[in-house]
């Protein structure tokens, strides 16, 4: 029990030290704004993307029906491109916001920095929502997809006797034969 308290204390101290070092940056107000806005915008964007990409059945308990199954084969590479583009755009927006500090003062450089922060926030929230949609849809169509999730599930299956890590249980046709 004492070890757990020490670990949580160490992790809390590291987190507070990290926040203190962030607070010394001139773009710290922009980071706070992003920490508040990104989860909210990502949640709204996830709903919008799931409707736009015709994957609205993700939230139900049913299996994917044929139109959704047919759409996913073509949408998967497109969604990967959206994730890559928004990731690159977000990183470039935040790097520009760090070099042109989006501080609390009113100057031309600060306004340009805040514009870059806006691009970074919007691109990062689209990146988060598109990545969440990609993972959720991939696992909806195939429980072992994406590849590293399948590798993780197989490792957990081999380490334990629990069959739920491999997703829906596939029936063995030889065991179902009636003699």
Image (spheres, rainbow, N blue to C red):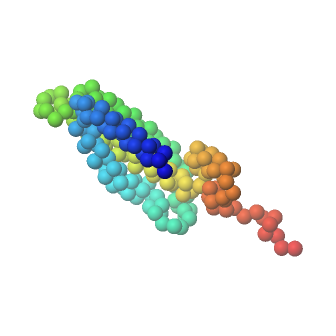
User: Could you say where residue 169 lies in the image, as x and y percent from the top left?
Assistant: 67, 62
Q: Is residue 95 left or right of residue 107?
A: right
Residue 88 vs residue 163, the one in the foreground: 163
Q: Is residue 155 left or right of residue 104?
A: right
Residue 177 versus residue 53 in the image, above or below: below
Residue 79 visible within the image: no
What residue sits 39% from the left and 34% below the top? 88
What residue sits 37% from the left and 42% below the top? 12
Residue 137 versus residue 110 in the image, above or below: below
Residue 82 vs residue 149, the one in the foreground: 149
Q: Residue furthest left?
A: 106
Q: Residue furthest front?
A: 2
Q: Is residue 164 left or right of residue 118?
A: right
Q: How many marks on residues?
A: 0
User: Could you say where residue 53 lies in the image, as x and y percent from the top left?
Assistant: 44, 54
Figure quadrant of residue 83: top left
User: Could you say where residue 67 lies in the image, as x and y percent from the top left?
Assistant: 53, 61
Quarter of the image with the C terminus in it:
bottom right
Residue 52 versus residue 107 in the image, above or below: below
Residue 80 visible within the image: yes
Residue 146 vs residue 26, the one in the foreground: 26
């Amino acid at each position: 029990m004492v070890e757990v308290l020490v670990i949580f204390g160490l992790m809390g101290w590291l987190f507070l030290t990290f926040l203190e070092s962030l607070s010394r940056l001139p773009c710290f107000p922009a980071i706070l704004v992003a920490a508040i806005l990104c989860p909210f915008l990502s949640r709204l964007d996830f709903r919008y993307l799931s409707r736009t990409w015709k994957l609205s059945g993700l939230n139900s308990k049913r299996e994917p029906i044929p139109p959704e199954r047919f759409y996913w084969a073509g949408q998967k590479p497109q969604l990967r491109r959206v994730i890559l583009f928004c990731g690159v755009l977000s990183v470039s927006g935040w790097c520009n916001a760090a070099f042109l500090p989006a501080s609390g003062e009113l100057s031309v450089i600060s306004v340009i920095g805040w514009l870059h922060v806006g691009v970074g926030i919007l691109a990062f929230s689209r990146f988060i929502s598109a990545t969440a949609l990609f993972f959720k849809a991939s696992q909806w169509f195939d429980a072992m997809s994406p590849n590293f999730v399948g590798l993780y599930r197989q490792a957990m299956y081999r380490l334990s006797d629990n069959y739920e890590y491999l997703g829906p249980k596939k029936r063995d046709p030889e065991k179902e034969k009636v003699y």
